[in-house]
Structure formats: C-alpha cells, structure tokens
Amino acid sequence: MNQLNALSTVSLAETPMLWLLVVAAGAILLSLLEAWLATLIVYGKLSALKKVFPATHNLIRSHIDYLMMATLLSITYFICHHLAIELPLWVIITLCFGAIYNPFGFLVKAINPQAGNADTVFGRIMVCAGFLPTTIGFGYPMVVILGRLF
C-alpha cells in the first residue's frame, strides 16, 4: 500500500515516461467505448448509431487498434523501466501522439467511409505521413532496447 501512495505523488512533469501509461489507459478507455458502440450497433440493432457509424467494421478496427496501442505503450514503458532507459521527451510526445492518432483514422472512416481516400499523389503521401509518429515513436525505443541488450 505504501508503494501505491508513493506512486500517487509522482508528477507527470517530473516523470514523463509515465505518460506512456496514461495514454495506454486512455486508449483502453476509448477502446471500451468503441466496443460498446459496436455492440449496440451489431447486436442491439440501434439504427441511430448505425447512421452515425455506417462503416461499423472500421469502428471495430479502431477498437482493436487502440487495444494494440495500449499494449505496445505498456510493453515499451515496462521494458524501458526494467532496462533503466529514459526516453527523450520528443520521443515520448511522438509516441503518445502516434498511439492516439493512428487508430483515430479508423474511427473517422467509421463515420465517413470516404475519408482518407486520397485521389492525388500529395494526398496519398499525406495519409502515409500520418503513420510516421507511430513508426518513429515505437521504432526509436526498440532500437535503444536492442542496443542495450546487445
């Protein structure tokens, strides 16, 4: 119980690595909300929700993607903690942003199935650029982890 009390006094400003766990918890909560929305659409047959989310399969994709991001954030945090790796603040921010932003595209497509269907080369480049924060955010710590292990 004393460890829990000690943890509750830790400042997120003083320990930015904890943001990985904060964002992971938020991603799980978002995923749970999406799971209930999908359940109400598919099994509850709520037509009003189906009108808001006409592409329910993309809502389910977002739900799964947020769960994956929460898992990856947590694993990244605990491996870094175990190996005494302190990530730079820019990596933490990039990682947290990417973990929320990446699955958000599926949520947008659940509401508007035509979203993200770029017709130009520039548009396709911009859609692909949206994956950079997640790639850089997870890639950097994994390279550091591998470097520490070998």
Image (spheres, rainbow, N blue to C red):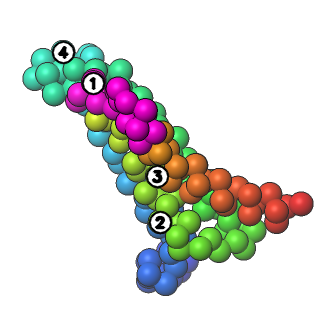
**Mark 3: which amino acid?**
Gly
**Mark 4: which amino acid?**
Lys
- Picture coordinates of residue 34 (x, y %)? 31, 35
The picture quadrant where one finds residue 40 is top left
Taking the image as shown, residue 38 lies to the left or right of residue 143, namely: left
Q: Earlier in the sequence, mark 2 or mark 1?
A: 2
Q: Earlier in the sequence, mark 2 or mark 3?
A: 2
Which range of residues does the magenta coloring cover?
109-126
**Mark 1: which amino acid?**
Gln
Say which mark, if any, is on residue 98.
3
Taking the image as shown, residue 120 lies to the left or right of residue 79, namely: left
- Do the CB atoms of the residues marked 4 and 2 lie less than 8 Å apart? no
In the displayed structure, would residue 73 be above or below residue 51?
Answer: below
Q: Quadrant of the C terminus?
A: bottom right
Of circles 1 and 3, which is in front?
Answer: 1
Query: Could you give the CA–CA distance between mark 4 and mark 3, rounded to whole angstroms?
Result: 33 Å
Asked whether residue 38 appears in the rendered view, the answer is no
Taking the image as shown, residue 16 lies to the left or right of residue 56, namely: right
In the displayed structure, would residue 60 be above or below residue 140?
Answer: above
**Mark 2: which amino acid?**
Ile
Of circles 4 and 2, which is in front?
Answer: 2
- Picture coordinates of residue 60 (x, y %)? 38, 27
Q: Which residue is mark 2?
A: 93
**Residue at left 53%, top 74%?**
89
Q: Earlier in the sequence, mark 1 or mark 3?
A: 3
**Residue at left 52%, top 41%?**
68
Q: Which residue is mark 1?
A: 114
- Picture coordinates of residue 137 (x, y %)? 56, 57
